[in-house]
Image (cartoon, helix red, strand yellow):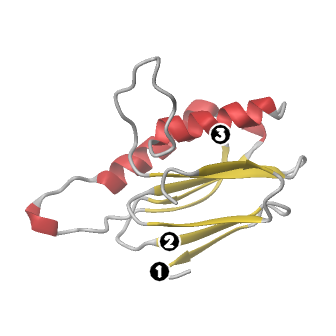
């Protein structure tokens, strides 16, 4: 669900459906651990005493990075995939919020900031995407369209 994230090796697979949201997957090929986050918006104003919230891209990826550091791994060791950011309401009421575009841009920025190895990407346009990460193998399956 939007705002949720997972990191570890216990889950068999992780899956989500994204429209203007973005899903970012991480997988460590040697340790066979990984994770996924599904964020709604790129960021928010946040004071130091506010807990991180997975609904925001910068905070969701920060939480994933904290988890992978606790696992004694480094961001540069992870294969990363980026999906989503669709323009799901292209002509809605003549207002252009560009949420999908802003989410994609945040995804690129976070991948660069943390030094993940980007190996798969499918972003933009106006089509929702189903994303599934197989934790044991690191295989990421992405299908365009709105049903699971």
Asked whether the residues under the numbered discs 3 and 1 touch, taking CB atoms below 8 Å apart as contact, a structural biologist would say no
Number of numbered discs visible in the structure rendering: 3
Question: Of the residues under marks 2 and 1, which one precedes in the sequence?
Answer: 2
Q: Position of residue 19 (x, y in %)?
A: 41, 66
Q: Position of residue 101 (x, y in %)?
A: 34, 52
Residue closer to the observer: 70 or 82: 70
For the residue carrying disc 3, how many other residues have a C-alpha within 10 Å: few (<14), some (14-19), or many (20+)?
Answer: many
| As drawn, 119 above or below 43 | below
**Looking at the image, which residue is at 40% across and 49% down?**
103
- Which numbered disc covers residue 84? none
Q: Dot 3 corresponds to which residue?
A: 64
Give the residue pinned by disc 2: 129
Q: Residue at x 40, y 42 (%)?
A: 42
Q: Is residue 68 left or right of residue 128?
A: right
Q: Are marks 2 and 1 in contact (CB under 8 Å)?
A: yes
* Residue at x 57%, y 39% (from the top left corner): 61
- Residue linked to disc 1: 145
Callout 1: SS: loop
Asked which secondary structure carries label 2, the reply is: strand
Residue 43 image offset from top left, x and y in percent: 39, 37
Say few, some or many: other residues with alpha carbon within 10 Å of mark 2 (under 14 / 14 to 19 / 20 or more): many
Separation of marks 3 and 2 at Cα, in angstroms: 21 Å
SS label for mark 3: helix
Q: Residue lying farthest top?
A: 48
Report crowding for label 1: few under 14, some 14 to 19, many 20 or more residues within 10 A (C-alpha): some
């Amino acid at each position: 669900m939007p705002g949720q994230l997972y990191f570890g090796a216990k889950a068999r697979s992780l899956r989500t459906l994204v429209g203007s949201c973005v899903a970012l997957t991480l997988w460590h090929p040697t340790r066979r651990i990984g994770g996924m986050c599904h964020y709604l918006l790129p960021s928010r104003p946040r004071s130091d005493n506010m807990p991180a919230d997975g609904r925001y891209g910068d905070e969701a990826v920060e939480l994933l990075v904290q988890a992978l550091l606790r696992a004694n791994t480094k961001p540069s060791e992870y294969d990363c995939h980026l999906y989503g950011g669709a323009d799901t309401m292209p002509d809605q009421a003549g207002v252009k919020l560009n949420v999908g575009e802003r989410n994609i841009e945040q995804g690129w920025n976070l991948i660069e900031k943390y030094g993940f190895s980007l190996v798969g990407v499918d972003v933009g346009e106006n089509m929702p995407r189903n994303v599934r990460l197989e934790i044991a193998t690191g295989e990421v399956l992405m299908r365009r369209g709105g049903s699971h």
